[in-house]
Image (cartoon, rainbow, N blue to C red):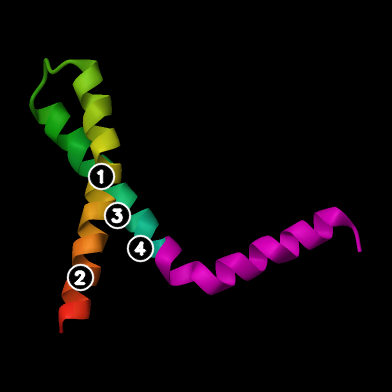
Amino acid sequence: MSSGKRLLETVGEHVDEHRGGMVVDFVFALAWVTVVTVVFDLLPGGPEWLYYLTLLGGVVAYFGFFWSLEAVREGE
């Protein structure tokens, strides 16, 4: 079996195992970027570095949100 075919099989298996999580990750990222972009479009004149810093803040927001969600589920 070629290494390229094996790589595709490995990626396919990974996607099959994590499909739901990947969709949630994508939706969160899409929503975050949309909200940040709309806010910065409505409030013109903000520095560009702040826009990118706010986008980067989505990483912290993502892990914070899902960490707290997991903590609530464990508490039930």
- What residue sits 9% from the left and 29% below the top? 42
- The residue indicated by pointer 4 is 24
Callout 3 amino acid: Phe
Chain-order first, disc 1 or disc 2: 1
Q: Nearer the viewer, residue 36 or 18?
A: 18
Q: Nearer the viewer's eye, disc 1 or disc 4?
A: 1
Q: Disc 3 and disc 4: Cα gap in Å?
A: 6 Å
- The residue indicated by pointer 1 is 60
Mark 3 touching mark 4, by CB under 8 A? yes
Chain-order first, disc 1 or disc 4: 4
Give the secondary structure at mark 2.
helix
- What residue sits 21% from the left and 58% below the top? 65
Callout 1 amino acid: Val
- What residue sits 32% from the left and 49% below the top? 29
- The residue indicated by pointer 3 is 28
Chain-order first, disc 1 or disc 3: 3
Q: Nearer the viewer's eye, disc 2 or disc 4?
A: 2
Q: Disc 1 and disc 4: Cα gap in Å?
A: 16 Å
Callout 4 amino acid: Val
Whether residue 40 sits left or right of residue 70 in the image: it is: left
Mark 1 touching mark 2, by CB under 8 A? no
Quadrant location, the N terminus: bottom right
Give the secondary structure at mark 4.
helix
Q: Is residue 4 magenta?
A: yes
Crowding at dot 2, Cα within 10 Å, few <14 / some 14-19 / many 20+, comes out as: few
Crowding at dot 4, Cα within 10 Å, few <14 / some 14-19 / many 20+, comes out as: few
Q: Disc 2 and disc 3: Cα gap in Å?
A: 19 Å
